[in-house]
Image: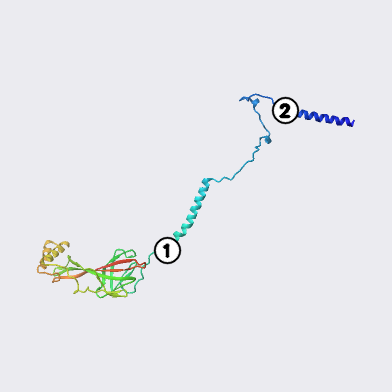
Amino acid sequence: MVCMGTRFTQVVAVAAVVCLFSCKDSPSKNHGPIVLGDSSTIVTENDPAQLRDMVTDLKPVLTSSVKQDTTDADTKTAAATKIDTPKKAAVAVAAPKPQIAQPIAGNGLRADFTETTVLITNVNGKIAGKADLHRANGAVYTMTSGTLNGNLIKVSGNITKVSQRYQTMVVVKNELGTLPVESLASTTNWQALKGANNTYRITGLDAKSLDEPDGNRNTIRNAVGKAAKRHHMSRRKVQEWENSVRNVRETNQKPLYVTLRSVMWKIDGKDDKGRMFSKQIRIDIPM
């Protein structure tokens, strides 16, 4: 009985193997072409296990060229900003505001330029225009008190020369009054003043040393008539002024007087960087 059972089992196994190969080798059934719209030809799979993609999902880290460029640009900009900022700050520190020259002790008319300070002793004056001479090359004053001849000019800084020139004008003084004659005037050339240790003495401005304008009888009479008309005098008054100088042949002959109208000084030197500079001061003397 045991032998028969074993044989039966073997027979069943052989039959199963034969059946398996028989099914594998049998031709597949041809269902024909798939017809669009025919639901019987559409294979629908609902098993998620069969629908799974067998290719491993790749998630590469892609570097965008735009993003890279932007990053590089930002990096360069940040680097440039980081580098440039200290440079600009350094330039700002290296370029301080110019300093006014050291003032000079003493009383008188003072002009504080950037490169030098000028002090004219024992003289006071009112400046015309801005009082700040930081960037100015010159200044004009009207004298209010003091005398110029014999006083000192003191300067600070590296000064190489101080020069002076002046302008004189003829004035008529008689019983009719005082009449300035502007057309009878003379301006001298620049003359270097003598000095040492940045101190110079003002000379040549006394009445006997003043330069006299040129003129003769006709030019003097015509100049006096023009001056009277400029002051809006009547025709009769103009004639009186002309007659008062009819016998005058020189500009220093009474009732004509030569008077000092203005004095100018030129200060030449070098600044702290070795550059040449020139400053001018003018003082007008009121009539």
Residue 218 percent coordinates (x, y) = 11, 65
Picture quadrant of residue 13: top right
Q: Residues within 10 Å of mark 2 (few under 14, many from 20)?
A: few
- What residue type is disc 1 on? Ala
Residue 26 percent coordinates (x, y) = 72, 26
**Seen in the image, is 107 located left or right of residue 45?**
left
**Seen in the image, is 35 located left or right of residue 253?**
right
- Residue at (85% x, 29% y) in the render: 8
Residue at image mark 1: 94
Q: CA distance from mark 2 to mark 1?
A: 98 Å
- What residue type is disc 2 on? Asp
Q: Residue furthest right?
A: 1
Picture quadrant of residue 157: bottom left
Q: Secondary structure at mark 2?
A: helix
Picture quadrant of residue 151: bottom left
Residue 201 percent coordinates (x, y) = 27, 75
**Seen in the image, is 137 located left or right of residue 247?**
right
Residue at image mark 2: 25
The quarter in which the C terminus is drawn is bottom left
Q: Which of labels 2 and 1 is toward the front?
A: 2
Give the label on residue 18, or none: none
Q: Is residue 259 visible?
A: yes
Q: Residues within 10 Å of mark 1 (few under 14, many from 20)?
A: few
Q: Is residue 287 visible?
A: no
- Residue at (83% x, 31% y) in the render: 10
The quarter in which the N terminus is drawn is top right
